[in-house]
Amino acid sequence: MERLNVYISRTGVCSRRQADAYISEKRVLVNGEIAVLGMQVSDNDEIRLDGKSLGEKAPHVILAYHKPKGITCTMDPAVEGNITQAIKYPLRIFPIGRLDKDSEGLILLTSDGDIVNKILRAENAHDKEYYVKVNLPLMGDFKELMEEGIEIYNPVKSEMTVTLPCRVKVINEQSFYITLNQGLNRQIRRMVATLGYRVIYLKRVRIMHIELNDLSKGAYRPLTETESRILYEAIQ
């Protein structure tokens, strides 16, 4: 059993919010009776919208997308370069979390709104790895300072905060990998800026067990069965 608005949205007809509007307008019938908000339905029920039987529910999908720089992680059609327009996926999907406009790399999108909420609620328990290049050679204690935590401004709470401990692997004099289990706004950029650097290139290469690998910029792929299974197990 599931809520009627969820059932309708999974057929690809509309969003959950729009489904609620259709139900409120008495345009939805369940087994010949006028539907009400919040009611539960199953696959055995006959659901009709404006007299037309709805198609089968589309199975949930989770995609790995290589977001290019310049794309904004919003579904708002008023925002130029929004992720929905960029990916052009035939079903309604939601980005899981965000990756700032000036950065590129891995972001997950899904048609399963429940998994979005579960992942975001447990965001600080999930590793995310980034490749970063800065404008100046790294000083000798850069790795240690970053790993211990940097005091940065948190614009969401309008206060200073110390970042959680993280892992840093220096690649060369201007590049490093950093693994965070935290998701503050523009966190890496603010951390390195505090130490006197400016990020000139930033790419997310991994979320939990899911890696970007050689996925082309602007391309997407569905998660493998193993990737999906581990993801669902991790958020239970």
Image (cartoon, helix red, strand yellow):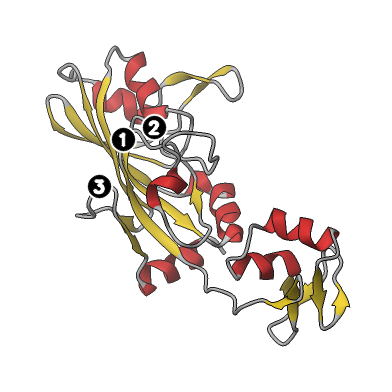
Using the image, determine if residue 177 lies above or below residue 218.
above
Residue depicted at 43% across the width and 44% down the height: 83
Please report whichever mark, 1 or 3, sits nearer to the chain's N-terminal start: 1
Element carrying mark 1: loop
Instruction: Give me the disc on residue 101.
Output: 2
Q: Label 1: how many residues lie within 10 Å, few (<14), some (14-19) or many (20+)?
A: some
Element carrying mark 3: loop
Q: Label 3: how many residues lie within 10 Å, few (<14), some (14-19) or many (20+)?
A: some
Query: Which residue is label 3 attached to?
Result: 217
Residue depicted at 81% across the width and 75% down the height: 29
Q: Can I make out residue 214 in this image?
A: yes
Q: Label 2: how many residues lie within 10 Å, few (<14), some (14-19) or many (20+)?
A: some
Q: Tell me the quarter of the picture where residue 190 sits.
A: top left
Query: Which residue is label 1 attached to?
Result: 69
Element carrying mark 2: loop
Q: Are marks 1 and 2 in contact (CB under 8 Å)?
A: yes
Q: Tell me residue 200's x, y (percent).
A: 24, 24
Q: Tell me residue 211's x, y (percent).
A: 29, 55
Find the residue positioned furthest to the bottom.
44
The type of residue carrying mark 2 is Lys
Residue depicted at 34% across the width and 33% down the height: 70
Quote the CA–CA distance across marks 3 and 2.
14 Å
Q: Can I make out residue 1 in this image?
A: no
